[in-house]
Image (spheres, helix red, strand yellow):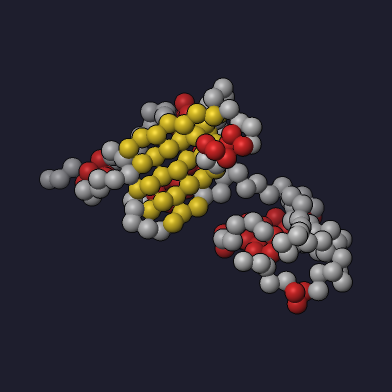
Amino acid sequence: MLPNVVQLALERAHVATSDDGYVEVDERLRTSAEGIWAAGDVTGKPKFTPLARYQARISIKDMLDGGAPAADYSALPTVIFTDPELAAIGVSEREAEEQGLDVEAATHELKTTRARYKNVRHGLFKLVYERDSRRLVGLHVLAPSASEIVAGYAVAMKLGATWTTSRAPTTRTQPLAKA
């Protein structure tokens, strides 16, 4: 679906667009025209409301004080709200290899206490990580509440989590035993 930018008369404002009609922006959402920023669907990035808000915050900070961080889309969680949910963050093995990364993947069937309590029989986790550094570059989950799992990993990936740290013995939420 092409962006609806015809009424904006971007060519008159000297705002460059891509061949497919999206507004070209730099890492701080600046367009080719001085003093014009773009955010949301018109940038050609995934069409998610939270992503548009993220871009807007960067744009506004850059407009007002110039100290905006560069937009970083490397830990953008996505989900399809089916039953079970299908959620992902980062890149797949194929995408990582296309980017020139040397990766491995670990796949685990869903076998958690919560899954047993809910009588869930199907589910899968797949972690994609760089072979040498073990840095996580992708997670793909098919499970109930996969969106919640991926949201937690978004923070971990932003903080540079590795395959080793993602398996660290931590205390997780536990169900109460039946009385």
Nearest the viewer among 112 and 17 is 17
Above or below, 171 against 56 in this view is above
Above or below, 17 against 163 in this view is below
Image coordinates for residue 131, horizontal then vertical, percent? 54, 25
- Where residue 51 sits, quadrant-wise, is bottom right
Nearest the viewer among 168 and 109 is 109
Q: In the rendered view of the protein, which quadrant contains the N terminus?
A: bottom right
Residue placed farthest to the left in the image?
179
- Where residue 175 sits, quadrant-wise, is top left
Residue placed farthest to the top in the image?
132
At 69% from the left edge and 60% from the top edge, which residue is drawn? 43
At 29% from the left edge and 45% from the top edge, which residue is drawn? 122
Number of numbered discs: 0
At 81% from the left edge and 69% from the top edge, which residue is drawn? 10
Q: Left or right of 99: which side holds 171? A: left
Image coordinates for residue 120, horizontal then vertical, percent? 25, 48
Q: Left or right of 141: which side holds 60? A: right
Residue 39 seen in render: no
Q: Left or right of 80: which side holds 54? A: right
At 25% from the left edge and 45% from the top edge, which residue is drawn? 121
Image coordinates for residue 21, horizontal then vertical, percent? 73, 64
Q: In the rendered view of the protein, which quadrant contains the C terminus?
A: top left
Residue 151 seen in render: yes
Image coordinates for residue 22, horizontal then vertical, percent? 72, 62
